[in-house]
Image: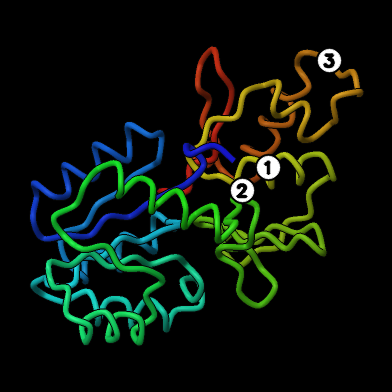
Amino acid sequence: MENSDYKILLVDDESDILEFLSYNLKKEGFQVSTATNGIEAIKEAKEFIPDLIILDVMMPEMDGMETCDKLREMPEFSDTLIIFLTARSEDYSQIAGFDAGADDYINKPIKPKVFISRVKAMLKRAGRSKDKKDNTTNGLIQIGPIAIDKERYLVIKDETELTLPRKEFELLLLLSSRPQRVFTRDEIYNGVWGENIIVGDRTIDVHIRKLREKLGDHLIKTVKGVGYKFDDKE
């Protein structure tokens, strides 16, 4: 799995640290979002749906410990990876962090190579996949403004159930499995129709048009010369 498939939320009240860590993660190909306190972090986490959250312990508004506690109470983040950043190396601080639900600890000052290595190792060890049901509750996958029921091949939008033809459903499922990621036409052909199936050049375009008619133009964006992406932010 490529680094570009992983989403990381950085939370720290020091702008220079956010900039420093964000730069190094983006240089490695990760998708990165940032927040400056716990309250902002929870809001951003709900929208960004990260695979990994890197939390500073000492922050205004809501510190890292309380933020971690609140995130762990939410079903969608019950098993999301969380790493604490802290300038405090006392044993009690680390114990409190693990009790709050942290998966790992990184002490400041931070060395870029060590930091990136720890992040990669944790993601690899956890075996996180973008195809997992990150937003699954009650058997439904909640993606932005819609819910997808894989077992019944249903899409729920504005409390209305929509039954889609099989290929339209599989196309939607593929695009929404990695929101904001651009899928090339070849990836879509292979993922939905299979490598050995020959279909017309306009097949994808027709299915995209039908999905837009049913779900709205804003959910699926065209990236000219490349392919399509699912936009989960209204």
Give the residue at x 8% y 46%.
Answer: 16
Residue named by callout 2: 177
Say whether marks 1 and 2 touch (CB < 8 Å).
Answer: yes
**Amino acid type of the residue tagged 1 in the rendering:** Leu
Residue named by callout 1: 174
Residue 192 screen position, x and y as percent: 79, 35
Q: Label 3 vs label 1: CA separation?
A: 19 Å
Q: In the drawing, does residue 163 fall left or right of residue 140? A: right
Q: Label 1 vs label 2: CA separation?
A: 5 Å
**Amino acid type of the residue tagged 2 in the rendering:** Ser
Q: Secondary structure at mark 3?
A: loop
Q: Quadrant of residue 54?
A: bottom left
Q: Secondary structure at mark 2?
A: loop
The crowding category of the residue bearing disc 1, from other C-alpha atoms within 10 Å (few below 14, some 14 to 19, many at least 20), is some
Q: Quadrant of residue 154?
A: bottom right
In the rendered image of this protein, does residue 142 appear above or below residue 224? below
The crowding category of the residue bearing disc 2, from other C-alpha atoms within 10 Å (few below 14, some 14 to 19, many at least 20), is some
**Amino acid type of the residue tagged 3 in the rendering:** Gly
Give the residue at x 30% y 68%.
Answer: 105
Residue named by callout 3: 200
Q: How is the image coloured?
A: rainbow
